[in-house]
Structure formats: C-alpha cells, structure tokens
Image (cartoon, rainbow, N blue to C red):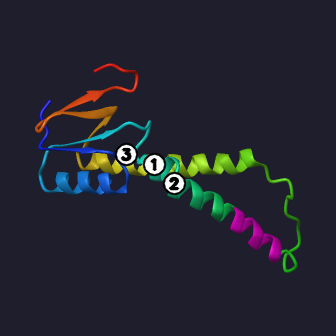
Amino acid sequence: MHYDIIVVGSGPAGQKAAIQAAKAGKRVALIEKEQGIGGNCVYRGTIPSKTLRESALQHERLKRSSEAFEGRLRTDVSVPSLLHRLQEVIKAHETFMTNQLQRNNVIYLHGCARFVTDHAIELESVDGMR
C-alpha cells in the first residue's frame, strides 16, 4: 500500500501529526502497537494517573464537605471500582480518537513498524505476521 505519510505511534503528537497531514490532503496511515489509539499516554501515563488522582481528590472533597450534607460516604471504596472508572475514561478517549481519525480519513494500522528502506516500512502484526 502507498501512503504519502506514515505516522508511527498514536500518542498525542502522532495523533495530531496524522490529522494535520490528512487535513492537508495527504493519504495518511497511523501505526500503533498498543491495542487502542493513544500510546503510553493513555494506557500507562497521564490519563491513568490523572484519573486515579481525580477520583481520590473527589472522594476527599466529599469527605470534607460531609458536614454540610446529610448522608454518608462509603469508606470501603475498592481498588477494582477505581480501576473500572479508569477503564471507562480510557474507552471514552479511544472512541473519541478513533472517530476523529475516521472523520479525517486516517488509516489506522495495528502492529509494529520497522523501517526497511528510507521509503518503505514493514508492518508486523501483534501476532507476529508480516
């Protein structure tokens, strides 16, 4: 297949580069080795840490303001419930980015990229097929 531009990695910079190239009229492919779009930022970095931090801060705010409200906070908030919230946030981000790439006609390819020449990339699927 031929593309004008191939972006390797779908983190914030890769997403923006692919979309800008597509808006400039280029035929663009975006290659990502993770299961979904977003790179480390979405799966191991900024989004997970900020989501868990925000959940903890929200819980603490509610605890501090409980004198003004009638009711009680659960004290047994479990790690699985926090992780469930995290998965919801990640899925929402994936859906948003997938839709944005599709709207801009960016081709998404799941696999590992390897430069074969200055102008050719080999795509190895996650299961090892080329």
Q: Secondary structure at mark 3?
A: helix
Give the residue drawn at x 57%, y 54%. 48
Disc 1, SS: helix
Q: Which label was assigned to residue 98?
A: 3
In magenta, the rendered stretch is 56-64
Q: In this rendering, would 114 be left or right of 66?
A: left
The foreground one among 101 and 13 is: 13
Q: CA distance from mark 1 to mark 3?
A: 16 Å
Q: Cβ–Cβ below 8 Å for labels 2 and 1? A: yes
Q: Are marks 2 and 3 in contact (CB under 8 Å)?
A: no
What x and y, as percent, mark residue 61? 75, 73
Q: Mark 2: which amino acid?
A: Gly
Q: Give the answer, above or below, for where 48 lies relative to 53.
A: above
Residue annotated with mark 2: 45
Residue in the picture at 18% in, 53% down: 21
Sequence-earlier tag: 1 or 3 = 1
Of labels 1 and 3, the one closer to you: 1
Q: Is residue 100 left or right of residue 2?
A: right
Element carrying mark 2: loop
The spot of residue 72 in percent (x, y) is 88, 65
Q: Identify the image quadrant of the C terminus.
A: top left
